[in-house]
Amino acid sequence: MNVIQAVKQYIAKMIEEAGQGMKVLLMDRDTTSYISMVYAQSEILQKEVYLFERIDSANRENMKHLKCICFVRPTKENIELLCQELKMPKYSLYFIYFSNVVSKSDVKVLAEADDQEVVREVQEFYGDYIAASPHMFSFNLLGCSQGINWSPNKLNRVCAGLTAVLLSLKKCPMIRYQNSSEMAKRLAENVRQVISKDAGLFDFRRTDVPPLLLILDRRDDCVTPLLNQWTYQAMVHELLGIKNNRIDLSGVPGISRDLQEVVLSSEHDEFYANNMYMNFGEIGSNIKELMDDFQKKTQSSKKIESISDMKAFVENYPQFKKMSGTVAKHVTVVGELSRLVSAKNLLEVSECEQELACQSDHSEALRKIKSLLGNERVSEFDAFRLVALYALHYERHSNNDMAALNEAMLRRGVNEKYRRMIRQLLEYGGTKARGSDLFGQKNPISQARKFFKGLKGVENIYTQHTPLLQEILDLLIKGKLKESSYPYVGTSQLRDRPQDIIVFIVGGATYEEAFAVYNINKSVPGVRVVLGGTTIHNSSSFIEEVSIATQSSIGAIPRKHPNSDSRSHSNANRRW
């Protein structure tokens, strides 16, 4: 189960079916992101695709010498744009691919618009999602809920995206959901309805153990997205922000023009692929090794004394240039992370966060938070997060202590919208909203969390926390996940140990959870897990999610530092 490979194979199949000759790739806003996540532009150029255009662009030229590969979502807007395109075609031939199921009525409308008979292919290729890594996907949707219910139109979008993931991975799963979440339940039922309605699309070869789709709700674990992170990928997202693999470094002091935006992709950057789950301490030494290796290679390349030396240098120059770009990029990113850690006193802040998440020494927690609230190096947002974590952990504790922290935030000058957000966070993911007991000892998951921590022995104080998802998956794999808490949709139940598991978190997943899934895939033989979410959160986007869900009047919380087989299913192929 590899979502990047699934989308890549769809794109490769589209280009292959268009045949030889110069081609243009016509996309919408969403599919542009889908493709850019899995293919570098240079890779597609090698496949004779020389032009990349948006279907909603008004300034495209007529280029009748080009074939057009059109990959768009089957939305009403895109159908209208395609009809306009086909009535006055700018290219010689059109190969149209929809990223999800398209209605017969829309296909008929397109056929009627094709007066000049330029369309050669219309198919459904189910790459309707952002493939963030081989085992993680997202829909880049923020604010999916209003109260405890779905926001208008978001349920249909998420259901369509999730069924596209299943189709691209060729999985017809049993479905379980978090019983305490009405949103998880509705999504599970809707996915089951789509599978029943389009049974022909989901008619894959049966396996001995059916795949499993598990739908969870972010409200059950509000701690994970509030924590500072110390593995490379998660830390970059937390402090700089990752959007479709791109990092905005324009706000970094003294940044050079060519490094104001950089791309971090495990598919196209070997150093990043090897280090994305390393902790910050290891990254520093690995960056030094990368620089030393680069310096050795460039020094040896300077010894040009003959024609053969010149030839060898020219042949190796692209590799030197690529390595130079990799070194410059990662040195810049890690340097900025290091600056922010120091400037914001994040080592001390993170230690306190971890203790709030994993330990229960109330008086010590209170003392440390008050001390950090008085430290001017601690940012306003980090001060708010510490109090938010305290409020989640000690929600049923004395109101006097919470009042004292509110008073300390007021003295510190923390903005009123952050102080009001504490109440909204408890409304969103407090004890009444959660199905799990994150900090107590009342259910098997809490016991599992204690067990996990006991196994670790001497812990890194900055990485004590394990996300709730890790323990849920552990219980699921061992057959101990309670059906009363995570019921099945329908009467069928999985009796064997699950092998292929797709987990989806309504309200967004995190890179810490992706790291947990990566470790499970690596350490548990025979089990393959893919994680998805409505979006991929860092702490600021999560607080924005909470703000939207609780219909806050405080306004959006400002972000921190700027920043499988690809063949189409036979019964889904549609031609004129």
Image: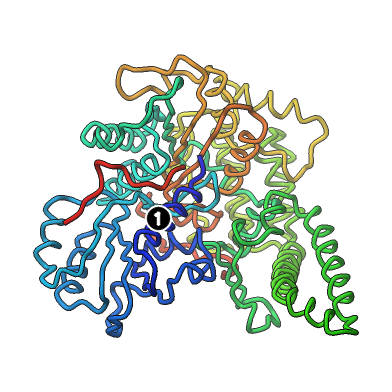
Q: Disc count in the image?
A: 1
Above or below, 250 against 394 in this view is below
Name the residue at 41% across, 47% down. Answer: 566
Judged from this view, the residue extending furthest toward the top is 495
Question: Is the residue marked by circle 1 packed among few (<14), some (14-19), or many (20+) residues within 10 Å?
Answer: some
- Residue 163 seen: yes
Q: Quadrant of the C terminus?
A: bottom left
Front in this rendered view, residue 211 or 471: 211
Between 341 and 307, which is closer to the camera in this rendering? 307
Residue where numbered disc 1 is placed:
13
Label 1 SS: helix
Q: Position of residue 72 (x, y in %)?
A: 31, 61
Q: Quadrant of residue 409?
A: bottom right
> How far across and down, in percent of the image, does residue 462 sit?
74, 46
Quarter location, residue 208: top left
Left or right: residue 395 versus residue 345 is left
In the rendered structure, the answer to whether residue 398 lies left or right of residue 568 reads right
Position of 282 with respect to 79 (left or right) is right
